[in-house]
Image (cartoon, helix red, strand yellow):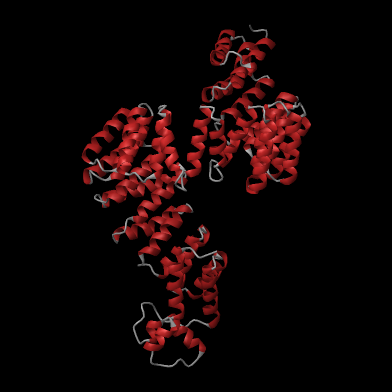
Amino acid sequence: MKTPGHLLLPLLLTCQILTGCAHQISEKVEHQASTPEQAIDDATHPQVAAGQKPDTPHRQFPTETFYDLLVGELAGMRNHLDIALDRYTTQARVTRDPAVVARATSIAAYAEDRSALLEMAVLWSEIEPQNLDARSLAALSLARSGQLSEAMTHAVYSLRKGDDESIMSIAVAASALSIEQRTPLLAEYTTLVEEFPDSQTLLLASAMLFSQQEDLQQALNTIDRLLVLAPEQENALMFKAQLLHQLDRKKEAIAFLASSLKILPDRMKLRLQYARLLSEDDLEGAHAQLRLLADEHPRDTELLFTLAMVSRGLNKTEEARHLFTDLTRHPGTAAAAHFELGRIAEEAEDINAVLFHYGQVRNGTKFLPAAVRLSAFIAKYDELNSARLYLHELRLNHPQHSAPLFQIEAELLADQDMLDDARSLMNEAIDEHPDNITLLYNRSMLSEQQSDFASSERDLRAILARDADNATALNALGYTLTVNTDRYEEAYQLINRALELNPGDPATTDSLGWVLYQMGNHEEALVHLRKALKKLPDPEIAAHLGEVLWVTGDREEARTVWQTILDKDPDNTIVLETIERLKAD
């Protein structure tokens, strides 16, 4: 593999530092090295060999150090970043040479090795405390690791030297922390704002922290303060609109963006945000704004794709078709555009166009959705064997997608009530992918549909043996035990653990309510079932809540809960079977 261009240049530059570009040094250096070690030292510090004053204290490198660094460079040029990083970090620790440590830091950043980056950046800042690049990287790395106090030491130093990049980096990294971890950090930022009241970056970063702490009003106040200093700063304008929207002041947010665009009509990101807000209630208005942007930026494929999707939402099918067709000519949007053209063709029942466009989706995020839709479309026309053959060929041609393609075929068979065939296919899939948790889960659900609860439990326990904290499997096993056995206490423990891992999940909350009902704890069951239905108006949750209400005597509310589902789906079998079983009609 060729070395990426943005890595090659620094590699070559470092090679020049290490070797001193011998043919050039020979023209400049008048003295003769007396030993091999001296020759290496001269090459590593050419300014010393030339009689110039070094930027850093001069020290000689032993041969093994020079060899390690050379191996590191060659490894980097061949994209063996693990070797390059190992050699450079080793010599950075040994030599503490600023150039070596800086290079090790650079390699760690490129390799996305956060542990090594943290160590090297901190070491670099210790060796060269006045180097703002070192300080900036140290601040960011420390913040990512949760060491906010240490990170702020570097960021404040940089801020006082006129570099505010670290202050923003820490605020961005803080989004991954808890509210408790961010509280002292926000206090430090508030103090800094008093010291640097005109720092736009500091004000924006402070507003971000207030937002992360869910103090949206204080975030808005801080942004307003920034806009007094810089009324046309685009990031601040966009952030204010976002905060207004989060504060349920959407009309005010839209009006604010509209007035901002009158003053700054050429700000693309601002207009795009305006279009997004409009799209929630005024799709025509959003379309008009996107059309303006598209006229100004006719080569922006991401923008054109958004316009095409909005056109499709407005049933402007011909406009959408024209835009998507143009987008198929661009590699970055071709697959997604063909997918959308396939959907348009489905609606028109244009069989040839469906086959063509979905068939053109050969990569990207739409590859599997296209396989789902095309196989279902073929099966719809009584060509199930053809659909299966199509999926089989995809597995052969795209082995990296073999597991999900097996699952797509199994679901296709299950939709045709061919559960034995679906389960047999899952057996084949798991033979090929024995550690694939999704396939095990899918087979478990098929087993349950066939009332083979022992097999279902076995697969779920196999998942938990590989991943003890798999909340989905914990909930599924707990619910399976609840509805098919009397092992309620065991089921309760499993479901409770799943809810600890995935708090607030409505499906797991429903399972908890249902097992509590089976255990006779009706009042607590009602609390959880109401909570679950409020989050997810699902027929099964409604059936459960209605049953507990009926059994506890609140029959009118039970009927109301069931009717809400039946109003939307009069033939819903889950609710109708519950009503019939309870003789509640």
| Quadrant assignment, res 99 | bottom left
418 lies above or below 158: above
Residue at horizontal 41%, vertical 36%? Answer: 322
93 lies above or below 190: below
Q: Furthest residue to the front?
A: 352
Q: Nearer the viewer, residue 346 or 127?
A: 346
Q: In this rendering, does residue 340 appear at all?
A: yes
Residue 580 percent across, percent down from the top left: 67, 10
Q: In this rendering, does residue 524 appear at all?
A: no
| Quadrant assignment, res 31 | bottom left
Residue 430 percent across, percent down from the top left: 73, 42
Q: Quadrant of the N terminus?
A: bottom right
Q: In which quarter of the image is the C terminus?
A: top right
Q: In this view, does 126 lie to the left or right of 159?
A: right
Q: How many marks?
A: 0
497 lies above or below 402: above
| Quadrant assignment, res 521 | top right
Q: Nearer the viewer, residue 315 or 214?
A: 315
Residue 93 percent across, percent down from the top left: 51, 71
Q: In this view, does 341 lie to the left or right of 516?
A: left
Residue 565 percent across, percent down from the top left: 56, 16
